[in-house]
């Protein structure tokens, strides 16, 4: 019989419902290791961690543990770019090619920075076959391939989740304008400057505090979350092919996985950043309250308003289900994919149930991270925590969905 998970940290009494839901995730929802954090105003009211760093349940979750947060890293890209917009170095309506001249190839000369941020630029995948693991081993090769790629649809006419290319698109824009690679930029301008533990590529000095990622094993009767990956790409064309290639090109690098040194070292900023709940909640706490932290301004309130205004809404061309984006952020969809009951909540889900969001109406920053993958759309663990948070704060829980 496995040992009972040790839960550590702090939870203010009025938010004990969140602590109870967190404990129930271990007792009833097969949690291995996880952390949850909630900031209200400028006050951290929940900061809990527990369970184990490894699938064998032998190493307790550390207070300073970090874990792959997947697409929860996309808003960090967006805020990094908004910092350059705030500084007057980038314009939202400007063509990307103004800053990245090679990008103008293949009919992309009119694609704007805004269209990149709202997932409507038509570049969710690379059509030409790429070497295995290319996204982990060649930044220059990936951005060259994107520059050469013809849009899969007319930019601005529809939107589709740029699951992996988003990081290279925004990251290269930052590099062209600022001169720093994204890993250095986010480390210096967000992590170190504002006390937010977030890494986009790192060396072995952090390996001891990285929680092992445990892949999701779906029950036999559960429908595939990505049924298009079961198709034969030789029979596909257009957006149907892009949907497949977004997840399958390039193929994985043999001998590596999400726990390998190659994966952790790579600058793959839409997909492999590492952080923890405390850091992500601090980030979103600032976004929920106008962009300020005790360390200074993270981003302007004007940029937060732009990020939190609906830009893309309806059926996502890549995911084939409802989705809603502002600029670089997913927005709440009541009754479909709510981020709590707040009508202006915004944030991002990540692969395997990780989640971070800001609720500006309630002044809440929320984050949940884990090391056992689950359902990426909405997972019972993050649903339970969010529902408990709003029950504790006296607001109605979001409308439940499957």
Image (cartoon, rainbow, N blue to C red):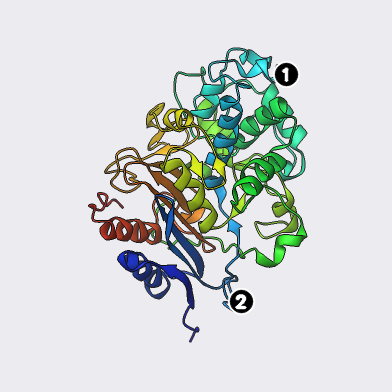
Towards the viewer: 14 or 161: 14
Observer-nearest residue: 270 or 151? 270
Residue 301 lies, in percent from the top left, at 45, 32
Give the residue at x 58% y 12%.
110
Whole-percent x and y of residue 360? 36, 41
Which one is nearer the viewer's eye here, 344 or 337? 344
> For the residues marked 1 and 2, what is the alpha-carbon distance in whole angstroms?
48 Å
Tell whether label 2 touches label 1 (CB within 8 Å): no
Q: Give how far across and how far down residue 307 sits, in percent.
A: 45, 31
Q: In the rendered view, tell whether residue 71 sits above or below residue 320.
A: below
Q: Can you tell which of label 1 and label 2 is closer to the viewer?
A: 2
Please tell me whether residue 177 is drawn above or below residue 2 in the rendered image.
above
Which element is circle 2 on?
Answer: loop
Give the mark nearest the N terminus, 1 or 2: 2
Residue 102's disc is 1
Residue at 55% over, 38% down: 244
Relative horizontal placement of residue 99, taking residue 228 as reference (left or right)? right
Report if residue 138 is visible in the image.
Answer: yes
Residue farthest to the bottom, as pictured: 1
The reply, left or right, for residue 261 in relation to residue 88 is right
Q: Which residue is mark 2?
A: 59
Asked which quadrant contains residue 222, the reply is bottom left
Tell me if I can see residue 225 in this picture: no
Q: How many marks?
A: 2
């Amino acid at each position: 019989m496995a040992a009972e998970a040790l839960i550590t940290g702090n939870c203010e009494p009025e938010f004990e419902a969140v602590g109870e839901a967190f404990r129930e995730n271990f007792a009833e929802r097969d949690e291995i290791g996880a952390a949850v954090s909630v900031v209200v105003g400028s006050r951290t009211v929940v900061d809990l961690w527990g369970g184990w760093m490894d699938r064998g349940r032998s190493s307790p979750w550390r207070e300073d543990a970090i874990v792959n947060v997947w697409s929860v890293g996309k808003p960090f890209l967006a805020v990094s770019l908004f910092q350059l917009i705030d500084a007057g170095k980038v314009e939202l309506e400007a063509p990307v090619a103004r800053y990245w001249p090679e990008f103008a190839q293949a009919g992309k000369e009119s694609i704007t920075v805004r269209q990149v941020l709202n997932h409507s630029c038509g570049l969710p995948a690379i059509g030409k076959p790429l070497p295995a693991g290319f996204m982990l081993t060649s930044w220059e090769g990936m951005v060259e391939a994107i520059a050469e790629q013809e849009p899969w649809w007319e930019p601005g006419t529809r939107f589709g989740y740029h699951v992996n290319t988003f990081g290279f698109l925004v990251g290269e824009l930052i590099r062209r304008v600022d001169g720093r690679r994204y890993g250095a930029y986010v480390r210096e301008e967000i992590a170190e400057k504002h006390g937010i533990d977030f890494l986009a590529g790192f060396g072995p000095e952090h390996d001891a505090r990285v929680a092992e990622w445990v892949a999701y094993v779906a029950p036999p009767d559960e429908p595939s979350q990505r049924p298009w990956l079961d198709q034969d790409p030789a029979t596909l064309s257009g957006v149907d092919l892009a949907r497949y290639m977004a997840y399958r090109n390039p193929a994985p690098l043999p001998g590596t996985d999400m726990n390998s040194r190659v994966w952790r070292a790579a600058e793959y900023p839409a997909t492999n950043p590492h952080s923890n709940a405390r850091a992500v909640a601090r980030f979103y706490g600032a976004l929920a309250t106008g962009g300020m932290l005790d360390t200074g301004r993270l981003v302007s309130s004007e940029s937060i308003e732009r990020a939190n205004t609906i830009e893309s809404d309806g059926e996502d061309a890549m995911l084939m289900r409802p989705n809603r984006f502002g600029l670089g952020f997913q927005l709440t969809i009541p009754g479909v994919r709510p981020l709590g009951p707040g009508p202006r909540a915004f944030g991002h889900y990540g692969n395997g149930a990780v989640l971070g969001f800001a609720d500006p109406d309630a002044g809440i920053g929320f984050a949940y991270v884990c090391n056992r993958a689950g359902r990426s759309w909405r997972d019972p663990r993050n649903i339970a925590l969010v529902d408990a948070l709003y029950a504790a704060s006296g607001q109605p829980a979001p409308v439940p969905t499957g």
